[in-house]
Image (cartoon, rainbow, N blue to C red):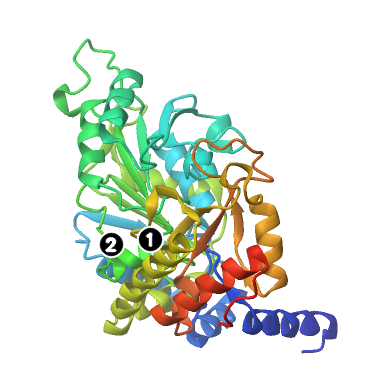
Amino acid sequence: MKDKQIEKLIKAEEARQKKTISLIASENYVSDDVLKALGSKFTNKYSEGYPGKRYYKGQTYTDQVEELCRERALKLFKLSPEKWAVNVQPLSGSPANLAVYVALVPAGGKVMGMSLDHGGHLTHGHKVSATGKYWMQVPYGVNKNTEVLDYDELKKLAIAEKPAMIIAGYTAYPRIVDFKKFREIANACGPIRTDGASPTSNGARAILMVDMSHFAGLVAGGAYPSPFEYADVVTTTVHKTLRGPRSALIFSRKDKTKTSVKGNEISFSELIDKAVFPGLQGGPHMNQIAAVAVALKEASTPAFKKYAKQVIKNAKVLSDELKKLGWKIISGGTDSHLILMDTFMNGKGMSGAEASDKLEKEGIIVNKNTIPNETRSPVDPSGIRLGTAGETTRGAKEKDMIKLAKRIDGVLFRKGGDKF
């Protein structure tokens, strides 16, 4: 590389990644093949529009890449192309979620999403996000005592508020989500109708959107329940448990429709495509889409299924070991790749910011995180979030998690601890 400054920084980052343990739940390590596709000559091509409907010429191979990526995405999650569509152009998760709002919910409409401090994402309607500035969030959270979702309470809230869309799937909720119950809740709380009919008559109901960004790879590997039987729309990033590049996908049912301003029925899929382009984006990043296609193929292998199951095994062991060492684990454990740990412990411990700083000095990378019923500031919260996807990619097994738990405990209490 001629640019020695950037080359030096790239090498420094490579060295940092090699010598540290990454427990960031939203990070992973991609294959060399994914990196090759990401750095390919597709970077040079501008491909505004969709396959067969581009605005510029020279699209023979970009069209093939995008179509292949769509095909692999549907196949990986066992979806019929007659019933489901997928948009592979979103640049990342937040724009993907925003596109769904723009496509399906009128400005100012209600969306029911988990509050940020309970494990929701900014794009689930939080006030600092565009999704909270242009739409009205009906926030929900976990039960104060159990720290898990109470579906009966969610149903009561939904029926009372009648949101246009309900969002399931989270950034810091470690338990399995019951998508069937969410479907029942969405069916029971359709938006207020203007024709005098009850909310649930004539098919009126809330849209169910599932954001599976964190557990998409676990679904692909058969280690976590699939939301597709019950959801109308499913969004996901590709760079977490799915082990791909920074990117996102939007899946939508072709048979779900809304009435357009001209009185015609238009499918969710068509509305979402229009929201992505030209609504929010120009030309897609074709090198990124090529890399996504590579990652999707990798995720369809038997080896990936084994990987997905190992990710959860590792998370459960790490969670259990930290509990044995006296740490409070939110909800008492995990069913996925992530763990939410209370480090403040009602003032007996330390803030999440202090804990993450201490761990980083010892080569363990985590992120500070709010916990349910948070009493501290989001910039200096009471907990940390841990994830096992990245270290599992690097070959970690249960025995390594036992050592790692002891090391984390040792760093936070300055007891030393076993080396990982």
Query: Residue 111 falls in which quadrant of the image?
Result: top left
- Report how far apart the C-alphas of labels 2 and 1 lie in the structure: 7 Å
Give the answer, above or below, for where 366 lies relative to 159.
below
Q: Nearer the viewer, residue 280 or 197?
A: 197
Mark 2 element type: loop
Q: Residue at x 71, y 61 (%)?
A: 357
Mark 1 element type: loop
Q: Nearer the viewer, residue 81 or 36?
A: 36
Query: Residue 127 falls in which quadrant of the image?
Result: top right
Give the answer, above or below, for where 272 lies relative to 226.
above
Classify 10 Å Cα crowding around label 1: few (below 14), some (14-19), many (20 and above).
many
Q: Residue at x 59, y 81 (%)?
A: 39
Classify 10 Å Cα crowding around label 2: few (below 14), some (14-19), many (20 and above).
some
> Residue 170: x and y, percent?
43, 49
> Residue 367: x and y, percent?
61, 58
Visible in this render: residue 149?
yes
Label drawn at residue 215: 1
Q: Is residue 49 left or right of residue 200?
A: right
Q: Where is mark 2, residue-wise?
A: 224
Q: Is residue 331 left or right of residue 382?
A: left
Q: Residue at x 52, y 44 (%)?
A: 371
Is the residue under label 1 in contact with that under label 2 (CB below 8 Å)? yes
Badge 2 or badge 1: first in the primary sequence: 1
Give the answer, above or below, for where 192 lies relative to 42.
above
> Residue 33: x and y, percent?
48, 86
Q: Is residue 37 left or right of residue 166?
A: right
Q: Amino acid at mark 1?
A: Phe
Give the answer, above or below, for where 234 lies relative to 76.
above
